[in-house]
Image (cartoon, rainbow, N blue to C red):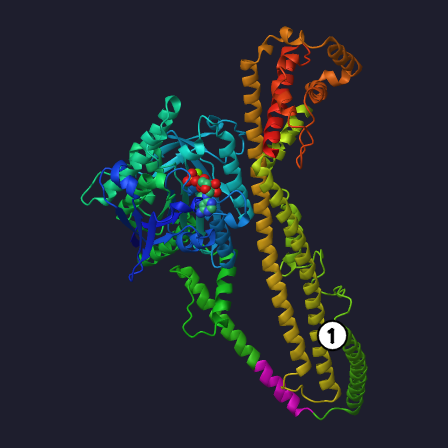
Amino acid sequence: MVKQTIQIFARVKPTVRKQQQGIYSIDEDEKLTHSLEIVLPRDLADGFVNNKRESYKFKFQRIFDQEAKQEIIFEIIAKPVAESTLAGYNGTIFAYGQTGSGKTFTITGGAERYSDRGIIPRTLSYIFEQLQKDSSKIYTTHISYLEIYNECGYDLLDPRHEASKLEDLPKVTILEDPDQNIHLKNLSLHQATTEEEALNLLFLGDTNRMIAETPMNQASTRSHCIFTVHLSSKEPGSATVRHAKLHLVDLAGSERVSKTGVGGLLLTEAKYINLSLHYLEQVIIALSEKHRTHIPYRNSMMTSVLRDSLGGNCMTTMIATLSLEKRNIDESISTCRFAQRVALIKNEAILNEEIDPRLMIVRLQKEIEDLKAELAMATGEQRTEALTEAELLQLEKLIASYLEDQDPESRLEVGADMRKIHHCFHHFKKLLNDKKTLENTVSSESTRQACQEPLRDEEYTKLLGLLKQRDNEINILVNMLKKEKKKTQDALQNSSLEKSDTRPPQNSPFIAGSPAVPRTPFSSALSHAQDLSICKHRSSLLHKKTGMREEMSLGRQEAFEIFKRDHADSVTIEDNKQVLKQRFSEAKALGESINEARSKIGQLKDAINQRHLQQVALGISENTVPASMPDPQEEKLRAQLEEEKGRYKTAFMHLKALKVEIEHLQLLMDKAKVKLQKEFEAWWAEEATSLQVNSPATNLQDAVKPFPQQDQTQLLSKKSSQDLEVENEAGRLEVCDRNARRILPSPCSNQQSQEPSGSRVLVQDRPLSSIPLTGDSQTDSDILAFIKARQSILQKKCLGSN
Ligand code: ADP
Ligand code: MG
């Protein structure tokens, strides 16, 4: 059992504005506890905050200032928790702080760079690395991802759902068993056998979360997310299984309701968030006070789920995220106060061990057998039925291994069955008799031979001939070996020139693709290099989500292209594309050098074998015992081999890490694409609605009238000559698109606008009512939405480029 208080850490988010400096300071005293002092600016101390204390001091295990990188956060905060999970203890890391203070950044990571990946992906990486290293146990890993919003739980990993609303996701409910253990009904658990699989699940959940979020439910700031790694381990042959859970929790923003200043639905939500965090606070207070018997875990779903993590069987760590700007001072102080309370809570983590029922049954069956036998012996009750064939065979095997065992302490365990004991004695007697008879025959044979006369002549000549024949054979063999030796020396000279053909020799154990090749760490490198292409084949669900665009009409696609070009995220996507390209070529180069090293290893191994044979042959031909002195040539070859193996291993590890990075970057890009798509859809819908509300063209007949006759006939003739185009929505938008091009000034190019600045007036002033329409209300609203969209994009662009 490990007793310890909840560890608290603070992380300060980088501030944009320089003038915010001086608001806080970080001290590290002799006892290595860190304290954060928040200094109230004079104007705030004078009025806004009631008590006029000028500064507040808070103690933390450690405080990470603005420049702290994600790596150090993982090393100091998360790694120890991951280690205890691997040892079989439950662990929780939760981030607490106001919206925008960096909770998601710390727990999951930034959306842009690989180096910004947060605690979850780093922990997954660490856990899988450790599992691979430890072959003494059998591990299984499962992942679940739960979102709690407005007191309802949602499964973010349900593969059957294509959620577009949070409510579409399966609802998770809480069940409590008589022992007051919490069970989550409907929360799916997914096995992950590799880091990549786990990473895919994380991104799937995050993407689901993003898609399900609407402007009305800013779920990312108003919900709690719990990513859980379920780890079980077992020693081979043992019936005891250890279960450990690691919760990585991104809590809702801790800001107070009064501050959010929202009404209607949002207020209800704010109240709820506040409620569940308020209940969390109540639980924390109850736990930190001595002599409290009732802890109000049941008040909210979140506290029920995290029950074990707070004041229970768990190693728990809290990260207080702070955005220390002037306007956030009061929120930051309340976050720190909360952390101080949390630090008082003591947890008692125990190993969660369980007996595997199947293995237990086998064990118990054997015990019953043994006990029955003992009972029979004790009561004098004899078992009369004969031992079966199988039982006899097993008994004899036992005796054989007992006799072979050199250990004088070894015992022959046959249980308390008298039949078996009798059989053992019987068998021993038989063996003893057999041995005696054998000894007698051998001794009589040797005396008989000793008494015989010396070998007869003809036998002598026969043996002499045989000896000669063997001599000849040896000579032939020695010649063969000499030839081989010469060949190897030539080969060695060639290879030392480093220009030799790097193809593995035909009998090399490392021929790529050879079915006989065992999957040693070396041979699997190639498959790793090949696996890189498999990186592309990622979670189909995530792909489906990024593939939404294919269903768009052509006009919408074009609008999307323009939207995308203007969007800030497209820079990130482009940047990541470049990085990805670079990583791919690095991976390719690494793959090649791994192959080279592998064939070199093969060659060196061959050369060593040859050298060995030569030495033996030499010994035979010169009739000398092989020298016990090490052969310098062979030593040199071995050194080269070790060096090559080292190079191979380094490149292999590098390639493995690169593979994960590539996967992560691709997932980041996929997520960014989904986000872009979602924002476009929202913007498009908004444009269409505002158009329908604002434009006089809602009366579509009116809209057609003011349009110059000539243009309208032009449009009609276009329409008739391109019937096919008009058949579908895409076609209609094509038509409208061409007209839009006529109406609108040519788009300001990305680089430099060629348009006179006056054209902007044209864009803005052109009445929508002068737009050619088809008369079909659905089509026309599509046309109008599109034109409006283009106009607004163009306006934005023109304004931006000036
Ligand atoms: P929260 O989840 O607490 O609402 P986020 O993690 O979303 O806050 O952070 C808000 C913004 O600040 C994001 O754009 C994020 O990338 C950025 N950010 C937060 N912490 C850091 C940090 N330590 N370094 C760089 N950027 C950060
Ligand atoms: Mg967040």
Image quarter for residue 287? top left
Determine the quadrant in which ligand 2 lies: top left
Image quarter for residue 292? top left
Residue 351 relative to residue 491: left or right: left
Residue 662: x %, y % from top left: 60, 48
Q: Is residue 447 magenta?
A: yes
Residue behind mark 1:
496
Residue at 55% x, 42% y: name it.
200
Q: Is residue 345 visible?
A: no
Quadrant of the drawing holding the N terminus: bottom left
> What amino acid is found at the position of numbered circle 1 in the picture?
Ser
Taking 471 as reference, is 377 above or below it? above
Residue 111 relative to residue 755: left or right: left
Quadrant of the drawing holding the C terminus: top right
Residue 709: x %, y % from top left: 73, 8
Q: Nearer the viewer, residue 229 or 105?
A: 105
Q: Nearer the viewer, residue 66 or 167?
A: 66
Q: Secondary structure at mark 1?
A: helix
Query: What is the magenta range?
Result: 440-452
Q: Nearer the viewer, residue 705 or 527?
A: 705
